[in-house]
Image (cartoon, helix red, strand yellow):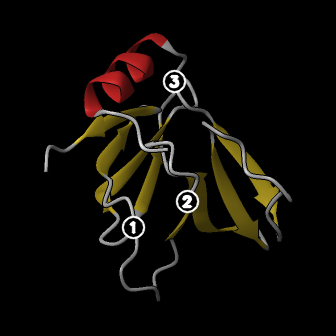
Amino acid sequence: MRWPLWILKFSDAILPSRSLLVYDNELPKKLPRRNLVLLRDGGENWSINMKCPCGCGQTIELPLIQEAKPRWSLKIDDGGLPTLSPSVWLREECRAHFFVKRGRIFWVKS
């Protein structure tokens, strides 16, 4: 179920920031509902995986490796909160468009 944008913004403002969970070589069988999962292989950051924050349940995989196109960059602040760039824009299904900054979702109006 996709929630209205005002509910998503409100809930993200009052809930704790999303944290980054690190896994080596393979993803957990079930992705967490809110947190981001960093997948590493041989100590190299490979991808960020997460459930779509709109509530549709879609799994999002964002490659981090140099060879991938498109690819995202990950920054982790002193508090361990993740920032991704560029924005995440799902062009099919729920069509969510958002930024992840310091563990928070910032929605782009469509």
CB atoms of marks 2 and 1 within 8 Å: yes
- Residue under pointer 2: 58
Mark 2 closeness class: few <14, some 14–19, many ≥20 residues within 10 Å = some
Residue linked to disc 3:
17
Real-space Cα distance between discs 3 and 2? 20 Å
Tell me residue 89's x, y (percent).
30, 62
Going from the N terminus, do you reach mark 1 or mark 3 first? 3
Which residue bears the numbered disc 1?
Answer: 93
Residue type at mark 3 is Ser
> Which residue lies most toward the left here?
110
Q: Secondary structure at mark 2?
A: loop
Report how far apart the C-alphas of labels 2 and 1 lie in the structure.
9 Å
Vertical placement of residue 93 versus 78, above or below? below
Of badges 1 and 3, the one in the foreground is 1
Q: Amino acid at mark 2?
A: Gln
Residue drawn at (31%, 61%) of the image: 95
Residue 56, position as x, y percentages in the image: 51, 50
Identified by mark 1, the residue type is: Glu
Please give the name of the residue rendered at 31% of the width and 33% of the height, measured from the top-left corner.
Answer: 4
**First in sequence: mark 3 vs mark 2:** 3
Secondary structure of residue under mark 1: loop
Image quadrant assignment for residue 83:
top left
Depth check: 79 or 16 in front?
Answer: 16
* Residue positioned 83% across, 69% down in the render: 26
**Disc on the earlier residue, 2 or 1:** 2
As helix, strand or loop, the secondary structure at mark 3 comes to loop
* Residue located 39% across and 51% down the image: 84
**x%, y% of residue 32?**
71, 42
